[in-house]
Image (cartoon, grey):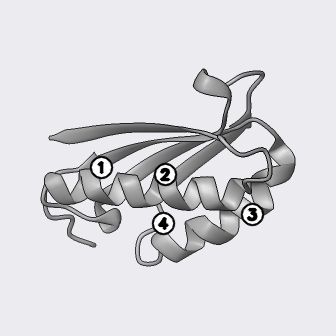
Amino acid sequence: MECFLNRTLKADVLEARCSFLFLQALKNMGEILKAADVGYENVVKTTVLLADMNDFAQVNEVYKKYFQKRFPARAAYQVAHLPKSGRVEIEAIAIVAEIVDQ
């Protein structure tokens, strides 16, 4: 079984940093994963959409704090516009089952 996640955050304050928004997106993702009785280690694929690719380094620093054991496959893109004028969006696919390393 797969669990599809999609979180978009809007920057209400212009000074808000992308890393803070991404941190909140990952915290929100964690709550969704917890509701499915899995964790970040069950995420096998992520797609990160950025309003500005120059934010990638900040996003990557936050990303490394949440994905430490198994690194999911990842794609990152700059997009012309995110819903609600968001700065960052992350989509993830998680396996809702025990993952066994072989």
Q: Nearer the viewer, mark 3 or mark 1?
A: 3
Residue 7, compared with residue 40, is above or below; it is above
Answer with mark 4 or mark 3, whichever residue precedes in sequence: 3
- Quadrant occupied by the C terminus: bottom left
Q: Which element carries disc 1, helix, strand or loop?
A: strand
Q: CA distance from mark 2 to mark 3?
A: 14 Å
Residue 68, horizontal then vertical, whole percent: 47, 77
Q: Which residue is mark 3?
A: 58
| Residue sitting at x 71%, y 46% | 13
Q: Which quarter of the picture shows residue 39?
A: bottom left
Q: Earlier in the sequence, mark 3 or mark 1?
A: 3
Residue shown at 59%/22% (left/top)? 83
The three-letter amino acid code for the residue at tag 1 is Ala
First of labels 2, 3 by sequence position: 2
Distance of label 2 from label 4 (alpha carbons)? 18 Å
Badge nearest the viewer, 4 or 3: 3
> Residue at position x 14%, y 41% from top?
1
Assess disc 3: are there few (<14), some (14-19) or many (≥20) residues with their C-alpha within 10 Å of its C-alpha.
some
Judge whether 61 appears above or below 89 on screen: below
Q: Amino acid at mark 4?
A: Phe
Q: Amino acid at mark 2?
A: Ala
- The disc label shown at residue 94, or none: 1
Q: Where is mark 2, residue-wise?
A: 25
Which of the labelled discs sits on residue 71, or is there none?
4
Residues at marks 3 and 1, CA–CA distance in whole angstroms: 23 Å
Residue 34 is drawn in which quadrant? bottom left
Q: Position of residue 41 (x, y in %)?
A: 33, 67
Number of residue marks: 4
Label 1, label 4: how many angstroms apart (C-alpha)?
12 Å
**Of helix, strand and loop, which one carries label 4?**
loop
